[in-house]
Image: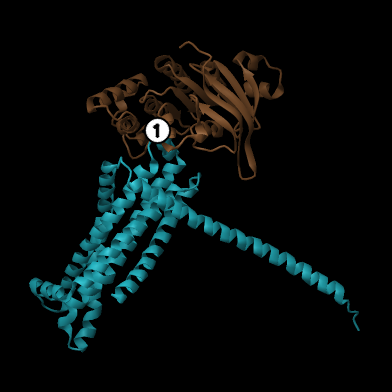
C-alpha cells in the first residue's frame, strides 16, 4: 500500500491554486481597469467635443467640406445598395403574397420595411464602413505624422477643427443619405414588381405612400441622427486616440468600423423598443 | 541679433517618464534672448520629449518650465493658446497637413493666429515666406509632391509665417542629404537674423550644430551631461563626447 501524506498534498494544492487564482485575478482586474479607463476616455472625449461644438469660432468651411466628402464618398455605394435592397425585397416577398392573393399589398409592405428598418440600418452600416474607417484612418495617420500636434501648437484646437466638423457632418449627412436610399429602395421595388408583373409608376408609388404613416417615418429619421453621431464620434475617437506607430492607423480604422457597426445595431434596438412603446 | 541676458525659456529640475521608464530624470537649462541653443544627444536621450514639454504637448512629472515669464504648466487654455502663438515648432517629420496644398498649409496658422489680416495681406505674407525659403513655385503643390528637403522648408515657412519669438526645431536635418542639411542650417540662421528669434535646436547632426550653435547642451541618460560653447565639446577628452563628435 502506498504511503499517504495528506499535509504535503494539501499544501501543494493550496499553493498551486493560490498562484492560479492570483494570476487570474490580476488579469481580470487589469482588464476591468482598462475597460473602465476606455469608457471614461470615451465620455471625456464626447464631453470635449460637445463643449467645442458651442465655441465661438466654428469651422464652417471645414464642416461644409466634410459634408461634401461624406456625401460624395458614399453616394454611389448608397445608390446601388438602395436600389438592390428594394429589388431583392420585392422579388423575395412577391411569391408569398401571390399565394395569399395579397400582391396588391406589396408596395406598402416593401415601403414600410425599407423606411422603418432596411433603409436606415443598411445605409448606416455602409456609412460605418466607409465613413467611420475613413475618419479613423485619416485622423490616425494625422496623429502618427504629428499633424495633430502641429495643429495644437499653432493655437488651433484639433478637436474643434477635425472632430466637431466631422461629427456634425456625419450627423447631418447620414439622415439625408438614408432618405435618399429609401427613395431609391422604393424605386428598386417598383422595378422588381415589374419583372413578373405590370404596375405603373404612379400606381405603385401611390399605393406605397398611402400605406406609410407619420409614425413610420419620424422615429426612423430621428434614429438616423443618432447613427450619424455615433459613427462620427467613434471614427474620430479611434483616429484621434491612435497610438504612435503606423500599425495604429490600421487598428484605428478597423476598430472604428467594428465599434461603429455594433453601435448602429444597439441604437437600432433601443429605437425599436422606444417606438414600440409609442 | 545681439544676444541679451534676458532668459526667454527657463527649465528647472524637469522630470518626465512613461510608465516605469524615466526619460528625463533631472534637467535644468535656459535659453537667452536671440540665442541659438543646440541640444545634442543620442536617440532616446529625451531631446524631443524635452522640447515637447516646452509647448505642453507633454506634461512633466516634476519641475517647472517658464517661457517668456509664464509658467507653462500653470497656464489655462486661453493662456496656453496665447503663449503658443509666440512659439514656432518645426516637427521632425515636417507635419505638413496632407489634405491641404502648400498655400493652404501656410494660410492655416496665419488665419487663426492673425485674425485681422485681409485676403491680400495673407497672400503677400504667404508669398514673402515662401520666397524666403526659395519655394514660391510650390504654392499649389500637395505635400505628397514635395521632396524631404522641400517638406522641411515648407514646414519652416509655415512656422515663421506667424512671426514667432521663439523657434523650436526638432531634428531639422534628420533624413536629409548633407547638402540639403547645410541649406536647412543656413535657413535656421537666416530665420534668426530676419525674425530676431531665439531658438532651441534639437539634433544629433554635428554639422548642423557647428553651423547654428551659439551654445550647446549635451543630454545623456536624461540629464545635462555638458554645457558650453561648441569648442569645449570638440576639445573634450571625455570618451562619450569624443565618440559622439567622431560619429
Name the image quarter holding residue A83: bottom left
Question: Relative to the observer, which residue lies in front, B193 or A55?
Answer: A55
User: Taking B37 as reference, is A277 above or below it?
Assistant: below
Q: Residue at x 57, y 27 (%)?
A: B11
Chain A drawn colour: cyan
Residue drawn at point x = 18 percent, y = 79 percent: A106
Rendered image coloring scheme: by chain
Q: Position of residue B187 (x, y in %)?
A: 43, 19
Which residue is identified by label 1? A154
Q: Quadrant of the C terminus of chain B?
A: top right
- What x and y, as percent, mark residue B31? 54, 21
A3 sits to left or right of A124: right
Q: Residues within 10 Å of mark 1 (few under 14, many from 20)?
A: many
- Residue B205 is left or right of residue A84, and the answer is right
Q: For the point 48% across and 49% down, which residue is it?
A: A248
A133, A263: nearer the viewer: A263
* Nearer the observer, A142 or B243: A142
Q: Colour of chain B?
A: brown
Residue A129 seen anywhere in this rendered image of the structure: no
A270 sits left or right of A8 in the view: left
Amino acid at each position: 500500500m502506498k504511503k499517504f501524506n495528506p499535509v504535503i498534498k494539501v499544501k501543494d494544492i493550496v499553493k498551486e491554486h493560490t498562484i492560479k487564482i492570483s494570476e487570474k485575478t490580476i488579469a481580470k482586474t487589469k482588464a476591468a481597469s482598462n475597460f473602465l479607463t476606455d469608457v471614461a476616455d470615451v465620455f471625456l472625449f464626447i464631453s470635449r467635443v460637445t463643449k467645442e461644438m458651442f465655441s465661438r469660432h466654428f469651422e464652417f468651411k471645414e464642416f461644409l467640406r466634410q459634408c461634401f466628402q461624406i456625401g460624395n464618398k458614399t453616394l454611389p455605394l448608397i445608390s446601388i445598395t438602395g436600389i438592390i435592397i428594394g429589388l431583392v425585397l420585392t422579388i423575395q416577398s412577391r411569391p408569398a403574397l401571390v399565394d395569399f392573393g395579397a400582391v396588391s399589398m406589396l408596395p406598402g409592405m416593401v415601403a414600410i420595411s425599407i423606411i422603418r428598418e432596411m433603409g436606415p440600418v443598411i445605409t448606416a452600416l455602409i456609412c460605418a464602413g466607409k465613413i467611420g474607417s475613413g475618419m479613423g484612418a485619416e485622423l490616425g495617420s494625422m496623429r502618427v505624422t504629428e499633424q495633430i500636434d502641429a495643429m495644437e501648437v499653432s493655437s488651433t484646437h484639433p478637436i474643434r477643427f477635425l472632430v466637431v466638423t466631422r461629427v456634425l457632418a456625419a450627423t447631418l449627412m447620414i439622415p439625408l443619405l438614408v432618405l435618399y436610399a429609401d427613395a431609391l429602395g422604393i424605386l428598386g421595388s417598383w422595378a422588381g414588381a415589374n419583372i413578373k408583373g405590370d404596375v405603373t409608376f404612379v400606381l405603385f408609388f401611390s399605393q406605397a405612400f398611402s400605406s406609410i404613416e407619420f409614425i413610420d417615418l419620424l422615429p426612423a429619421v430621428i434614429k438616423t441622427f443618432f447613427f450619424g453621431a455615433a459613427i462620427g464620434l467613434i471614427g474620430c475617437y479611434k483616429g484621434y486616440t491612435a497610438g504612435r506607430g503606423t500599425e495604429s492607423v490600421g487598428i484605428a480604422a478597423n476598430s472604428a468600423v467594428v465599434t461603429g457597426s455594433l453601435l448602429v445595431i444597439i441604437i437600432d434596438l433601443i429605437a425599436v423598443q422606444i417606438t414600440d412603446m409609442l | 541679433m545681439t544676444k541679451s541676458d534676458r532668459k526667454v525659456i527657463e527649465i528647472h529640475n524637469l522630470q518626465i517618464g512613461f510608465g516605469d521608464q524615466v526619460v528625463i530624470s533631472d534637467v535644468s537649462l535656459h535659453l537667452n534672448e536671440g540665442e541659438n541653443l543646440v541640444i545634442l544627444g543620442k536617440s532616446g536621450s529625451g531631446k524631443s520629449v524635452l522640447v515637447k514639454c516646452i509647448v505642453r504637448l507633454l506634461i512633466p512629472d516634476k519641475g517647472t518650465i517658464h517661457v517668456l515669464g509664464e509658467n507653462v504648466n500653470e497656464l489655462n487654455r486661453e493662456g496656453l493658446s496665447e503663449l503658443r502663438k509666440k512659439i514656432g515648432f518645426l516637427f521632425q517629420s515636417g507635419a505638413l497637413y496632407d489634405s491641404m496644398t502648400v498655400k493652404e498649409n501656410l494660410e492655416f496658422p496665419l488665419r487663426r493666429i492673425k485674425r485681422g489680416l485681409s485676403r491680400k495681406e495673407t497672400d503677400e505674407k504667404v508669398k514673402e515666406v515662401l520666397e524666403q525659403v526659395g519655394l514660391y513655385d510650390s504654392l499649389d503643390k500637395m505635400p505628397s509632391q514635395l521632396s524631404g528637403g522641400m517638406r522641411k522648408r515648407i514646414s519652416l515657412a509655415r512656422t515663421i509665417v506667424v512671426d514667432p519669438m521663439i523657434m523650436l526645431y526638432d531634428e531639422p536635418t534628420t533624413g536629409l542629404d548633407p547638402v540639403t542639411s547645410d541649406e536647412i542650417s543656413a535657413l535656421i540662421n537666416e530665420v534668426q537674423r530676419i525674425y530676431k528669434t531665439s531658438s532651441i535646436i534639437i539634433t544629433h547632426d554635428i554639422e548642423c550644430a557647428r553651423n547654428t550653435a551659439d551654445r550647446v547642451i549635451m543630454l545623456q541618460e536624461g540629464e545635462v551631461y555638458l554645457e558650453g560653447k561648441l569648442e569645449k565639446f570638440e576639445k573634450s577628452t571625455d570618451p562619450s563626447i569624443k565618440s559622439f563628435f567622431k560619429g
